[in-house]
Image (spheres, rainbow, N blue to C red):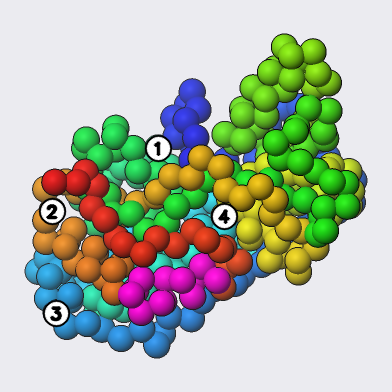
Amino acid sequence: MRRILAAGLLATLAVSACSAPATTESESGSTDSSDRTHDVSGVAKVDDLAALLPAEIRDRGTLTIGAAIDYAPAEFRAEDLTTAIGYDVDLGKAIGRVLGVETEVVDGEFASLLPGIGTKYDIGISSFTVTEERTANFTMISYITVGSSFAVKSGNPDGFNPDELCGQTIGVQTGTWQEEELAAFTEACEADGNEPIEVLPYAKQSDVTTNLVGGKVAAFYADSTVASYAVALTNDQLEVVGGVRDAAPQGIVVAQDDAELTAAIQGAVQHLMDTGTWGDILDSWGVTDAALETAEIHPQA
């Protein structure tokens, strides 16, 4: 989940290192990110849906997608530090295939994306949680549900119980919503006379994952998609326990006054859901139980 900071909405689950105070260095190396791009070249154009595109986009031949490409595994940079990859990127490409146009991902700071929808960007696909504030000003088409999850070593050798956190050692990436939650949880532990949670913060999620594999922490707490991705990257050395907490839908953002583009994007996403392509994309990235089956428009009429 993208969180709100004093400086604006910023992505914090970055692939590259981000500077932050009071972080812990990894003692056992780091887990590298991996490109698990799903090949969507076989997705065919659907003429009826392509006809719904605004003439300007059809004539241009390119759908411009705004994204903050620093949020693995949804949208982030490949090893060349230039190419955008991730399940959101794959979804955007698949939408373009259905609508018969190329797609271009234009990188921008997360806080700058929404103001650019309808001008700089045709649409935004960048892990936008559907909120009343956003749907008051934009149309959003839901496609995935994301919450928070705990991950542990496979087999849960320490017997970590996500419902009994007091006294546990838990890793988390700095600046994330989950770090704030853990701070609140440990305050509650102390208020009840229990041992506080030992929270070990790291600047990079890769270091959080590595220190869980290495046994320095009993669990980590992260976005549910991030946790699933970590399981895949470590070849199942980890597992998710306790399911997904506080799940909420995320949506593709379209200008509120662009009914034509909204219809085209909704139709394309629903087609990708119905054909199983969207589920296959998430499977490639190790993300499970997150795909929605209906591309709903928000706000609902």
Identify the mark nearer the N-term, 4 or 3. Answer: 3
Label 3 with label 1: CB-CB less than 8 Å: no
For the residues labelled 2 and 1, the Cα–Cα distance comes to 22 Å
Locate residue 163 relative to residue 280 in the image: left or right: right
User: Dividing the picture into quarters, in which one does residue 285 lie?
Assistant: bottom right
Identify the mark nearer the N-term, 1 or 4. Answer: 1
Q: Amino acid at mark 1?
A: Ala
The residue indicated by pointer 3 is 48
The residue indicated by pointer 4 is 225
Segment tinted magenta in the rendering: 272-283
Q: Amino acid at mark 4?
A: Thr
| Mark 2 or mark 1, whichever is nearer to me | 2
Q: Amino acid at mark 2?
A: Asp
Is 69 rendered above or below residue 173? below
In-front residue for pair 100/272: 272
Is 148 rendered above or below residue 61? above
Q: Is residue 100 magenta?
A: no
Element type where label 2 sits in the image: loop
Q: Residue at x 29, y 32 (%)?
A: 133
| Mark 1 or mark 4, whichever is nearer to me | 4
Q: Residue at x 21, y 43 (%)?
A: 299
